Structure formats: C-alpha cells, structure tokens
Image (cartoon, helix red, strand yellow):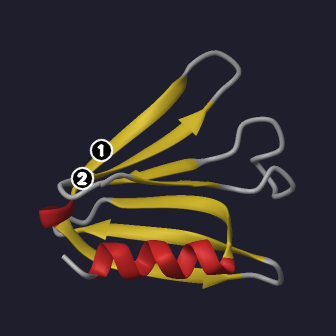
Amino acid sequence: MTHTFKASHITSGNVMFPDRLEIDDEKVTFYKPHLIGHDATVILRSNIGSVSIKVGLLFADIIIETNGGQITVANGFSRSDAKKIQKLLTNK
C-alpha cells in the first residue's frame, strides 16, 4: 500500500510547488518540485537510520537520516501528517 503526503502550500518554500512524500512497503520517495520538473530522492526503508520531526508553530519538517549518513529534509507538513509519516517509517 502506498501512502502519499503533500506539504502545505502556505509554508515557506512550498507556495507554488509543495514537497511530497510517497511511502510504500519497500521505499520512501521524496519529491521536490521545481518550475520545470522535480528532484526525486528514493530511500529504501531498510536503509533508514532515523526519522525525526522538527515542529514549528503550525507545521512540521520531516528529517530522514539513512544508515550511511544521508539527510533528507521535507518541510511544511501538518503536525498530524508528520506524526503519521514518522510512525510509518519507524515501524519497519
């Protein structure tokens, strides 16, 4: 089953092109859209070392660190979505 989470349009850096996370049983795909195209980062769930949340006043950032030390930050998610994302990724 694939879970898709989209950042809020009203957060900094996401006004026109919000970040998006897709989580399935084997991997996490982080999409960072641009005016033309997008960057996609794929992280195998078996390589996730830690998942943390940086909570702001209204929104939260998801910080995913791999076992190899790569850090991916997706910002502007609702607090409830951030908690769901963290729960999905920490329950391998």
Q: Nearer the viewer, residue 39 or 29?
A: 29
Residue at 21% from the left image edge and 58% from the top image edge = 25
Q: Which residue is mark 2?
A: 27
Q: Which residue is situated farthest in the front direction here?
A: 1
Question: Where does residue 45 sit, x and y in percent of width and height?
Answer: 20, 62
Q: Which residue is mark 1?
A: 42
Quadrant where the N terminus is found in the figure = bottom left
Image side of residue 73 versus residue 7, left or right: left
Quadrant where the C terminus is found in the figure = bottom left
Q: Which residue is situated farthest in the left direction here?
A: 46
Question: Where does residue 91 sit, x and y in percent of width and height?
Answer: 25, 81
Residue at 55% from the left image edge and 58% from the top image edge = 74
Number of other residues with Cα within 10 Å of mark 1, as a class: few under 14, some 14 to 19, many 20 or more: few
The kind of residue tagged 1 is: Val
* Disc 2 secondary structure class: strand
Residues marked 2 and 1 touching at CB (< 8 Å)? yes
Image side of residue 91 versus residue 15, left or right: left
Residue at 32% from the left image edge and 69% from the top image edge = 65
Q: Quadrant of residue 82?
A: bottom right
